[in-house]
Image (cartoon, rainbow, N blue to C red):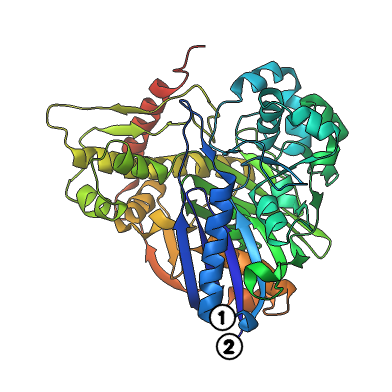
Amino acid sequence: MKVILAIDLGTTGNRVIAFTADGSVAAKSYYEFPQIFPAPGWVEHDPFDILNTTKKALQDVISAVGADSVVSMGMTNQRETTLLWDKRTGKPVHNAIVWQCRRTKPICDRLEEYSGTIREKTGLPLDPYFSATKIKWIIEHVDGVRRGIEQGNIIFGTVDTWVLWNLTAGRVHATEPGNASRTLCYNIHTLDYDEDLLEIFGLPRKIFPEVRESSGLFGNTAKEITGREIPITGILGDQQASLFAQGGWEEDVVKNTYGTGLFLMTSTGSELQTSGRLLNTIAWKTDGEVCYAMEGSVFVGGSCIQWLRDGLKIIRSSAETESMAASLGSNEGVYFVPALTGLGAPYWDPDARGMIIGITRGTRREHLVRAALEAIAYQTRDVIEEMERTTGMALKKVRVDGGASKNDFLMQFQADILGAAIERPVLTETTAFGAAGIAGIAAGFWSRNGFFGTRKVERVFSPLVDEKRADLCYSQWKRAVKRAMGWVVD
């Protein structure tokens, strides 16, 4: 039995899955790693936690299926998270600065005059979310980094590049266009790093990885890691991988990944459609053709449930939230705006902060849980309304995936608030499946249509409440958001 391996490099943990030709899971392994919060709004990862959990999961799966059965492997990753390391020693100069981290807002403020140029060239707003200001922060705050760059010893990568470099024993320093397009240094029109952007951020081109097509041979793994050299034949950013797995090359397909954040994406094909409130990005490049996408990135999705568990400690597991929320007939006026690291699309307010409003003496933990789940659905509608305005699409169905999509209460509430069907596949780990797909197609394991033909729908949630009631609930959410915005005062 031959398999394709997918390495799914997430924000809170790393997963490896082996897929057979019919799309079934032959083996999988997952390991969480710690989140580091050095200051309010700051988020870091230890780069070796990322690498070691990846290796461990990879070795688990290879042991289960046998190295000789692996045709090739693909990789998908949390995107904008930023690492710099010494290419002589492989030692990082600092912890990875995670995409959620807001520490670089002062740098963004200093560069505000260039925001129009940045938006025009990259399709992205000038925001701490993306990699360039994170690189600049490390150079400005970590001793010896600037000198190491001048000497040609320090290189940069997002998480895909870091893991690829290590799995190939330092032989390959590369990425692909979807990930490169999230750095704020890659011009999505010319498909190259842009000298004007590099000058704006004061970053040398030589630290950046080579940009290759998303589907094709990136290199072979080191034998000492995987038992034999295994080709790596595809890389996609996590949301691009999810879109690929959901058949996102088709017209009017919107997917939403309910992960740490919420990531809605729709393909615009070879045409770049612009929106001032959403992201215009590259989905992938294959066979010389670029596919563009429009994306709404919400910073806090499933992580607000994680916060209820680990921060407030009012739940023991995310699984219990479904029954807790369903035990109430309504939210009874309690709303939670989970702006725990500011607000992303479509608001783009790094100064917003989390807020729970509508609390009374009768409020219990069930209300907070329900409000958190409802917030996920409301934030999804925020983004989809902007997509509809920009593209002219009339939404009838959303294809969903990610851990929180397994929550039936949330999926039904999402259908009710959107007034649209929610289609949940059997396999909700579609970021991994997309990575397998892009790699398997390059390796001749699947055709594109053959790959998508393995997708199976588990359940469709249709709206059960009338539009008037849904709109009333949503209007209250918008009132709550307005109160949470602009909270931080410098």
Category of crowding for the residue at label 1, using alpha-carbon neighbours closer than 10 angstroms: few (below 14), some (14–19), many (at least 20): some
Residue type, numbered disc 2: Met
Q: Is residue 246 visible to us here? A: no
**In x, y percent, where is residue 454?**
55, 77
| Left or right, 102 with reference to 268 | left
Q: Position of residue 329 (x, y in %)?
A: 17, 46
Residue located at (31% from left, 51% from top): 318
- Residue 89 vs residue 400: left or right? right
Q: Quadrant of residue 128?
A: top right
Residue 346 can be seen in this image:
yes
Residue appearing at x 72%, y 73% in the figure: 229
Name which quarter of the figure residue 313 lies in: top left
Of labels 2 and 1, the one closer to you: 2
Q: Secondary structure at mark 1?
A: loop
In percent of width and height, residue 211 lies at 80, 52
Q: Which residue is mark 1?
A: 20
Question: Mark 2 — residue?
Answer: 1
Q: Nearer the viewer, residue 279 or 233?
A: 233
Decide: marks 2, 1 in contact (CB < 8 A)?
Answer: yes
Query: Looking at the image, is mark 2 or mark 1 earlier in the sequence?
Result: 2
